[in-house]
Structures are given as C-alpha cells and as structure tokens.
Image (spheres, grey):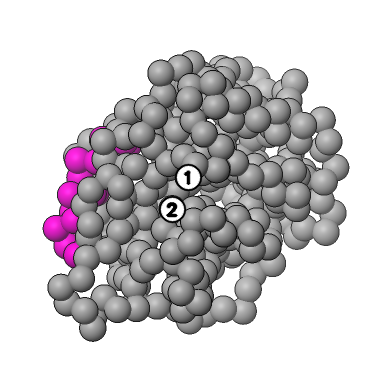
Amino acid sequence: MDVEICFKETLSKRILRLTRFICRHRGVHYSDDESMPRRIRHEGENTALSFLQPAPAQTHLVGDIRLHRQFYSRHLEFERSVIVYLPPSYKTHPYKRYPVLYMHDGNNVFDPRTSFAGVSWEVNDTVEKLVKEEKLEEVIVVGIYNTPARLYEYTWTPMNLDGEHMQGGHGKKYARFLVRELKQFIDKEYRTLTDRQNTAIMGSSLGGLINFYVGRHYSDVFGKIAIMSPSFWWGNGIAYKHAQNYPQDLKIWMDIGIYECGSHQPKANEYILRQTRMMREALLKQGYQENINLRYFEDPHGHHNEYSWGKRLHRPLLFFFGKNQKSADLSP
C-alpha cells in the first residue's frame, strides 16, 4: 500500500499530516492491511510510518537509461534528478527521432532501489516487451524525480490538510518548469519528435491531478494526457471547475483502482471511485468521445501503489503509442 503518514508533535497537540496519499471520505482514511510490513522513520521532530510493498529481487535495469543529476529549475528554485530511457534502436539509427513520454515521480518508474517502498512501475521492462512484440512504437521515457516539495508541486491551489496550515499550490510553477525548461532541455539533448501529437505526460495520484491542470493549460505542448488514480478530492474538487471548456484536441487516458484505499475501506473506495466517474462524465459532456479521444478504465484489482500502476501501464502506453489502437485495452 502506497501510504505514508507523518506525525508532528507540538506543545499543545499532535498534528496528523499525510505526505504521500490521502483517501478522503468524511475525513481522512487509509488502508491498514495487516499483511503489509511497516517502517518507522524518525526525522528530527517528525515521525513517519510507511506501509511497504515487498522489495523485488531486480537489480539490473533493462534498456539504455541515462541519469541527469541536479537538474535546476529557475521557476521552482530547486534541483532534481531526471532519468531518461532510450529506445532499443536509438544508437543504431542515428537519424531517427522518437515520441516522448514524460512521467512524474520519476524515481518510482524504473528503479526499485530509488522507488517509494522499493517497488517501481518497471516502465522500461514494459516498453521493451511491447516493442519486441511489435505492439508499441519506440518511445523515449523521461522520469521526473519528485522532491520534498512534491505536495506543493503537484497541486495548483492550496488546501488546509491539518486544520492549521495551507499546503500546496505551486503547480503553476511546476507546469512552467515542464514546458519552458525540462522539455526544451530534452528536445535539445535527445532526438525527439517535438510536436504535441508525439508528446505525452503520465502521472498517478497527485501526479494525475497535476496532469489534468497541464492538459487544461498546455494542450499546445502535450497532446496526450494519462491521469491514473487521480486525487480529484484536492482543493474541494476544484478540478471539476477546470473541466468546463476543457481543450477538445487532447487524447486522455483516465483510470482508477477499485481498492484505492485498501480492501477494508469500502466507503472510502466508493467515494474515490465516484469522483473519478464524475470527471469522466464531465469530459463526455464537454464533447469527448469514449474510446476515441477518451479511454476510461476501472482496475478490478487496483490499489493505490506502484505495483498496481505498473500492472496496467501497458494500457495507456498502447492507447497513446500502440501500433494497433483497437487492441489497446484487450490484454490483461
């Protein structure tokens, strides 16, 4: 289960602060699966309790992967790592250019050693497998590492989470970083197809939320938007207001797991599921067409973690870059 709960002590009371994921239904809920190991981490006056997924045995990363450390953003005034996967033919076809998929939480997408809870999406493995099976076009994947300011960068409006402090709200700056700094660097450094039709962006949880914002304001840059397990509860549902007059020229993948809040939280799961269904309906009312420029999927086994997102990753990949678009959602 992909949940982190932080407790911060004050003189007067204890504040419960969720820094990783919040399942919100008449308050804050989280899954308490007894089969999940726990980890307690002390950081000064903060104590973090993490629910861990089993760490895989994988140590060797599949494919040609490049790491750019300390990539600085003027808009965010922060450094982060950026990790890039290059297609199998990149070295042997020096004049070929490739579409690009940008992914938030880049430390979680390739390497289990850097991933939250030790489980990655295994994006490189999935892409190489689909390319080898001749189901997927070759694609460059750019993983954008998150930072301690993740909560702020992935939200464009602040929200009061602990009853005292407003948190979040730097998403506009983060989006400008993506468009004006990172994409320009990637297009200069690598042989990319730079047009919007060949530029996609993918994210889960708050990463899915910020993608909804990116699609609303930068559809001229990103033509394909993947919104996985989105946190539409943030900002008291402000995303639904942004659904009005949403750009019609996007290709959108949206999904949700049936067990986002854990198998023992049926009311919270229904709340999260209902929110995502509402957004699907809002987009359909705006003129999106199911299975043409909007693909919606409910994962019957899906939880809110990297394992679940990795298991269904092939679906949005095939929807965006598949050689046979009609079969994009047929494989298990």
The residue located at (59%, 30%) in the rendering is 280
Categorize mark 1 by other alpha carbons within 10 Å: few (<14), some (14-19), many (20+). Answer: many
What residue range appears in magenta?
Answer: 174-191
The percent coordinates of residue 266 (x first, y second) are 83, 36
259 to the left or right of 48: right
The residue located at (50%, 77%) in the rendering is 133
Q: Is residue 37 above or below residue 46?
A: below
Q: Main secondary structure of the magenta part?
A: helix
The percent coordinates of residue 313 (x first, y second) are 55, 58
Which part of the image, by quadrant, shows the C terminus? Answer: bottom right
Q: Nearer the viewer, residue 9 or 221?
A: 221
The percent coordinates of residue 106 (x first, y second) are 42, 56
Foreground tag (2 vs 1): 2
Q: Which residue in the structure is indicated by mark 1?
A: 226
Q: Secondary structure at mark 1?
A: strand
- Asked if disc 2 and disc 1 are in contact, CB closer than 8 Å, the reply is yes
Q: Secondary structure at mark 2?
A: helix
Q: Nearer the viewer, residue 224 or 237?
A: 224
Q: Is residue 193 visible?
A: yes
Alpha-carbon distance for marks 2 and 1?
Answer: 9 Å
